[in-house]
Amino acid sequence: MVQGPDQGRREGPAAVQSLPEAVRPSREGSAGESLAVPYRAKDNPTARSEFSHPEVIITLTSLSYYYGGLTDDVLRLTFAHLMRSDQADMEYQAWVADSDRLPPAFRQLAGINLDDERQCTEHVFPCFRYAKGAVDYFLAHVVFPKELKEFPHKLSASGWDIGEEKPRPTTGFSGTNDSRAFLPLTVSQLNDEGQKHTNALVLECLLQDETSVALMPKCKPTGQTDAEALLDMVTHLQPPIRVILDVGAQILELDNLGVAKRWLEITGDHESTQAVIFCDENDQLCVVDRRGRVESFQTSPFAGQTDVCLVFLDEAHTRGTDLKLPASYRAVVTLGASLTKDILVQACMRMRKLGQGQSVTFCVPDEIQQKIRPRHRENEAAIAVIDILKWAISETFADLRRGIWLWANQGRRHREHKTMWKNAQRGGSTKLDTKHAERFLEEEAQTLETRYKPKPPIEVKTEEDSTVSPKTRPDAITERLLELDGLDGDSAAFQEEQERELSPEIEQEKEIQRPRPAEPAEHILHPEIRRFVTQGILPEDPKVCIAAFKALSDTTAAWHFDVGKLPGGLLVTSDFVRTINPFGRDHVLDLFQRSIQWILTPASRTANFETAMEISPYEAQKLLPDIKTSDFVSLHLTRQFLRLSSGVDGDKSSDQGVSDASDVGNDALVQFMKVLMTKIRRNCESIDKTHIGRILDHRALRPLDFQ
């Protein structure tokens, strides 16, 4: 198997850890990160790689927290974030709806006191540990905004770069040849004639009469975990089992030491069973005795008396672990999802004298039974060893078909890079300008449209087609795709892993140059505004007042929609719009928009205009004496979003709300309003729980929303 920085392939059934434990804190040195990561085996996360597809990261991380719940520390952090948000009470009610037996005293957010440690840990946090609303809020506001990241471009390398032809030979070693299809085309596997029979020899050893099959029961006693059920079954098997090879990763609830202690507890014969050999978290062989003492196996008294020891090897250590065990020992080998023949046989060969006194029993869980029986001659007949081997071989072919597309992508990328590098060689030297170097980059960040838009089907003509010319015949990569029936690459991206090399950025000493502080603009009360108050004459000079939406022309919201096309019934004064002195070119004023406080409206008895005007607090203060005696205008103080004729006329009935949600059809206008309401008005806080937020998300308002 060839791995590279851009792609790693799974090594066993637990490539993704059991979901409650699949997040990054299980990875050493990464306690501050909270995303799901690939696992090479149970309790064995990859050192540096991560899933390449964002949907895979989001889905697995969400499932991990749904099943594993939120810890007290995480809940405290989530509550603190919620209490600082704009929609705290509304969001909290969604948590309450998903809570587990929450006391009535805590059904309002005001009843939660985070400083009361006992109240939180005993009465509040347990009720929200598995609440979907709380988990979703934690992921959407704490985890994903910080941890999820994409870069515009990436420079990729893979195993093809290691295996390319060089002046001097490159050699490697592999004990099997099942994965030779994943070797780069420039690498060929040398099979010694004297070793070709070993594959069949191992299968012959497994097909001997002493090899047996044990089916795990579908139902287990109430309160018993899967690990305890498996250990209980193993202790009752005959002949007695002395070794457990958990290559199928069936024991997930206990760590290796926990399995060893539990196995000793339920094993009765103290004379012949005094300890259990296992691998610790540092991949070192250890032994635990009946007194609970744990020590290194090599320096322990049991190093020379393995005949009184049981052996437990988890999935990660059923390959490469070498123990000299008595010739009479018998092992249980668990089966699991996507278990290939190579991995299964390697696990069985931990019994070095297999077929010469040592033997194995295959332990088949119900999930695997359902996959084996459809291939069986008689569906109700007992599952035999030959059926298990056939299933493992079929899983090997399925694994080849799953991985060959990633192999092909790497090969084509390497071929393109090699061609570009060759073109840069001129006169015995490399001449690579910036434009040429940028061709090596690939796009990483993609829009939803680019990522999921339909792709044309791949058409490949075979050499048997008489119309195919030598120039259009499939290349070696495509031929292997055809050979393994791997042309359907739609799901390949979901299996892709990558390692990001960020050390150059870490090594750089960055000097952050922040923009200089903004200079506040000087307040100006224009005479035309005073005349409007005293005489009711609207200013016509655009330098005095403009339409309210045109005041947003220097914000990011205006990037999505032409503000000049919006109605101009609401006016704003120039002093209201001008908050700072503009600096630089193409300045963006999202952070310097004044909130609506003071509004002048016509006095109904004498005014001859039908509009309203927003004024600044400075203007309101200066004009207040004139406003008190004016017969033309009235001054209002408001904190609500104005819904005038230019926007949505304040809906008071639930029936109108339903129709309004379906009328929001201009995508550009919707995006303009989203940026205005979230980025400018709410400082990037979500508004999805509000009526306006639901309408902008094309969700209809129902009568229940108005209650």
Image (cartoon, rainbow, N blue to C red):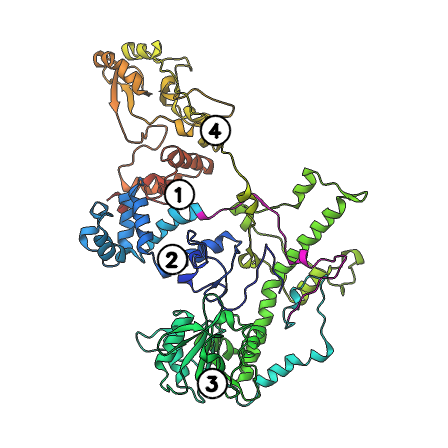
The answer to which of marks 2 and 3 sits earlier in the sequence is 2
CA distance separating discs 1 and 3: 68 Å
* Residue in view at x 40 percent, y 26 percent: 549
Residue 643: name its quadrant: top left
In the image, is residue 351 above or below residue 174? below
CB atoms of marks 2 and 4 within 8 Å:
no
* Residue 307, disc: 3
What amino acid type should be assigned to the residue bearing mark 3?
A: Asp
Q: Amino acid at mark 4?
A: Asp
What numbered label is drawn on residue 50?
none
Say which residue label 1 marks. Answer: 697
Circle 2 packing at 10 Å, graded few (<14), some (14-19), many (20+), is many
Residue 667 on image: x %, y %: 46, 38
Q: CA distance from mark 2 to mark 3?
A: 43 Å
Q: How many angstroms separate mark 1 from mark 2 (CA)?
A: 26 Å
Q: Which label's residue is closer to the chain start, 1 or 4?
A: 4
The x, y position of residue 651, in whole percent, is 29, 36
Residue 209 left/right relative to 62 = right
Camera-side mark, 2 or 3: 3
Q: Secondary structure at mark 3?
A: helix
158 vs 502, nearest the viewer: 502
Q: x and y percent of residue 630 in the render?
A: 23, 12
Q: Is residue 458 visible?
A: no
- Name the magenta segment's main secondary structure: loop
Q: Identify the residue at image location x=65%, y=72%.
A: 177
Point out the tag, 1 or 3, that comes first from the N-terminus: 3
- Amino acid type at circle 1 is Asp
Question: Which span of residues is magenta-colored?
Answer: 147-174
Q: Which residue is mark 4?
A: 562
